[in-house]
Amino acid sequence: MPRFRETVRTLLRERLLDAAYEAVADRGFDKLRMAHLASAVGVSRQTLYAEFPSKEAVGEALFQRELERCLVGIQEGLDAHRDDLRAAVRASVGFTLTLAGRNPLIKAMLTSTGEDGLLPYLTTRSAAAFDLATAMTDAYVTEAWPAIDPVARELAVDAAVRLTASHIVQAGPSPEESARRIADTVVRIALSTGREQLPR
Amino acid sequence: MPRFRETVRTLLRERLLDAAYEAVADRGFDKLRMAHLASAVGVSRQTLYAEFPSKEAVGEALFQRELERCLVGIQEGLDAHRDDLRAAVRASVGFTLTLAGRNPLIKAMLTSTGEDGLLPYLTTRSAAAFDLATAMTDAYVTEAWPAIDPVARELAVDAAVRLTASHIVQAGPSPEESARRIADTVVRIALSTGREQLPR
DNA sequence: AATTGGACACTTCCCAGAGAAGTGTCAACA
DNA sequence: TGTTGACACTTCTCTGGGAAGTGTCCAATT
């Protein structure tokens, strides 16, 4: 079984990231200490460096894992309502908003404008995360609701991502209410034809 | 003419704010010095303190004036196209985006998430600015295009403001292209009825 | 009467230097 | 292989003293 080593390794990796997440969550990334991280998991500093070549790599991996979790949550929100676009959007947006409410990492991911001293990667990475979330959602919607007009779909997905990020920064009354409004808005865009007329 | 004093006073006030704006624009608010500001305009420190009781008051006034200018620009963008909703939105959003591109104050106004060390007021005030911009735009649209459904209008205005702010943070290819996309999106929301059906 | 310059107490910034603590690497060891 | 201790190097952190900034008061000036 040549996989044994790998399994141990990824297990260690997960435990390291768990510990790192906890430390970052309540003391911030710059207060994270490599020595403390190693001892928290019960390994030497060297094995930590064997897994992550630098502290920056830890931040990078932490960021990536959190992003993936977020995207998985969104997908699950969509999956739960394949027959109802509005409910699907509401579930996904609601999930993201509540997650961001208590997860400082996710929050920073979507809001960092640069130079806020948090993680250097976030500056560059937040745009990448944005694009990734948009691309994934777009692909999903294309597959799940092929009847939606492509132009409308693209605008709707972009609006969904941006409005969600906006509500993370400028929070509304409650995540649920925000999600409801965003879902309403997104559905209106998605089902538009671009040939509507003003009533007279 | 009892107004003479007042005129002089507001004139002085404007000149002080002009000088303050220039100083803040390239050195930042915290590098602004009251003594420097006074001498730049050619008055003593005392007359400056007679006009603005504190440095904080200068920041407040500066912020307020910039916000008003921004709103005026938006109104003009709308006024220039009272017959064409799409063009009106495009003009206003385009104006705001290009303004924010070179005006650090406006940028901070719509993006500050708190504790970025810039101005303490911005933290609280950005939400207020947000609300004010939304309220003003909503009132204008209600008056200019009364045929738009109220629910759709409210969602459209909210989306317009939030999407514009989003494009300030996560800039697209160009302000014009961003404005075009936002206008397209906003028009689709504004002209929606909420009773659309998915094509089959 | 308004404006000014000087003087004031108080707070904050800035700048060294010293010491501690953290990072990343290496080699000896179990 | 993984652990341990030592290493050079960089980055915090604290300190104290001097400079500079804020906000206030007042006598002098116009």
Image (tube, coloured by chain):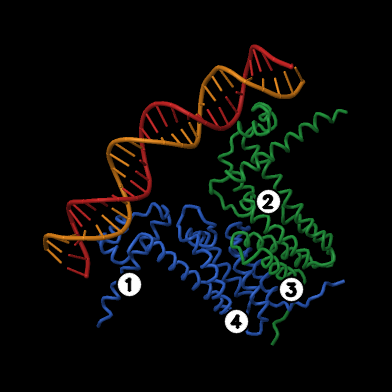
Chain colours: A blue, B green, C orange, D red
Decide if residue B69 is on the left or right side of residue A89: right
Residue labelled with disc 2: B129
Residue labelled with disc 1: A10
Q: Residue at x 46, y 54 (%)?
A: A118
Q: Are marks 4 and 3 on the same chain?
A: no
Q: Position of residue A195 (x, y in %)?
A: 77, 78
The mark that comes first in sequence, 1 or 4, is: 1
**Mark 1 surroundings within 10 Å by alpha-carbon count, few (fewer than 14), some (14 through 19), many (20 or more):** few
Q: Residue A12 versus residue B166: which sits nearer the camera?
A: B166
Q: Position of residue B183 (x, y in %)?
A: 72, 67
**Mark 2 surroundings within 10 Å by alpha-carbon count, few (fewer than 14), some (14 through 19), many (20 or more):** some
Task: Tell whether label 2 touches label 3 (CB within 8 Å).
Answer: no
Q: Residue A71 versus residue B173: which sits nearer the camera?
A: B173
Decide if residue B10 is on the left or right side of residue D13: right
Secondary element at tag 3: loop
Distance from the alpha carbon under mark 2 to that under mark 1: 48 Å
Q: Position of residue B71 (x, y in %)?
A: 74, 52
Q: Are marks 3 and 2 on the same chain?
A: yes
Distance from the alpha carbon under mark 4 to that under mark 2: 37 Å
Distance from the alpha carbon under mark 3 to that under mark 2: 29 Å
What is the residue that sits farthest to the bottom in this orientation?
A: B200
Task: Tell whether label 2 touches label 4 (CB within 8 Å).
Answer: no
Task: Tell whether label 3 touches label 4 (CB within 8 Å).
Answer: no
User: Which numbered circle lies on residue B82?
Assistant: none
Distance from the alpha carbon under mark 1 to that under mark 3: 49 Å
Image position of A117 with respect to B90: above or below: above
Q: Residue A160 versus residue B80: which sits nearer the camera?
A: B80
Q: Residue at x 77, y 71 (%)?
A: B191
